[in-house]
């Protein structure tokens, strides 16, 4: 995707709608499942990954304009869940190089949790 005004605008508009969708879905799911595991995150991650898989496959057969592709994938699904990007990248890696796919999954899952812990600990020390 090239960096130009139309693509930036499309990604921004998709991101705006994806973020609003995530907020709405999260508030509704929390209302229904107030004391469970983070169902809203699970829901948007599963739905977003499903939609990413559908779109990537459709785009192999029908080439949309760059702004439309950016609006739907980077913008809307990116704001709805960044997990969908991780999921399609991991799927592609697993199909092309199983070991890189597994490494990508482990590094993302473990690395992000460790990063959250480090950030949390640093902020706690600074604010204590």
Image: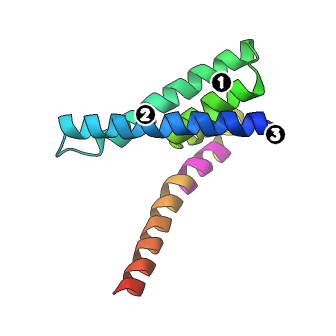
Answer left or right for 5 relative to 93. right
Magenta part mainly helix, strand or loop?
helix
Which residue is disc 2 drawn over?
Answer: 21
Measured as percent of width and height from the top left, residue 125 is found at 39, 85
The quarter in which the C terminus is drawn is: bottom left
| SS type, badge 1 | helix
Marking on residue 6: none
Please report the bounds of the magenta region as a residue range.
Answer: 100-107
Q: What residue appears at the point 57 percent right and 20 percent down from the top-left corner?
A: 54
Residue 106 drawn in magenta: yes
* Element marked by disc 2: helix
Residue beneath label 1, please? 56
Report the side of 127 relative to 88 (left or right).
Answer: left
- Classed neighbour count for the residue bearing mark 2: other residues with Cα under 10 Å, few (<14), some (14–19), many (≥20): some
For the point 37% across and 80% down, the residue is: 124
Q: Do the residues labelled 3 and 1 touch (CB within 8 Å)?
A: no
Q: Name the quadrant of the N terminus.
A: top right
Name the one closer to the observer, 53 or 92: 53
State whether residue 41 is above or below residue 14.
Answer: below
Q: Is residue 102 in sight in this rendering?
A: yes
What residue sits 58% from the left and 33% below the top? 14
Between marks 3 and 1, how big is the CA–CA gap? 22 Å
Answer with mark 1 or mark 2, whichever residue precedes in sequence: 2
Residue furthest out toward the top: 61
Query: Residue 4 — which label?
Result: 3
């Amino acid at each position: 995707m090239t960096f130009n005004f139309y693509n930036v605008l499309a990604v921004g508009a998709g991101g705006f709608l994806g973020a609003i969708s995530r907020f709405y879905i999260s508030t509704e799911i929390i209302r229904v499942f107030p004391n469970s595991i983070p169902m809203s995150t699970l829901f948007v991650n599963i739905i977003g990954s499903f939609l990413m898989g559908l779109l990537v496959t459709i785009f192999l057969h029908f080439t949309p304009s760059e702004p439309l592709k950016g609006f739907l994938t980077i913008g809307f699904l990116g704001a709805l869940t960044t997990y969908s990007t991780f999921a399609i990248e991991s799927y592609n890696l697993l199909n092309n190089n199983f070991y890189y796919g597994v490494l990508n999954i482990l590094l993302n899952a473990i690395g992000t949790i460790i990063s959250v812990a480090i950030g949390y600990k640093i902020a706690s020390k600074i604010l204590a």
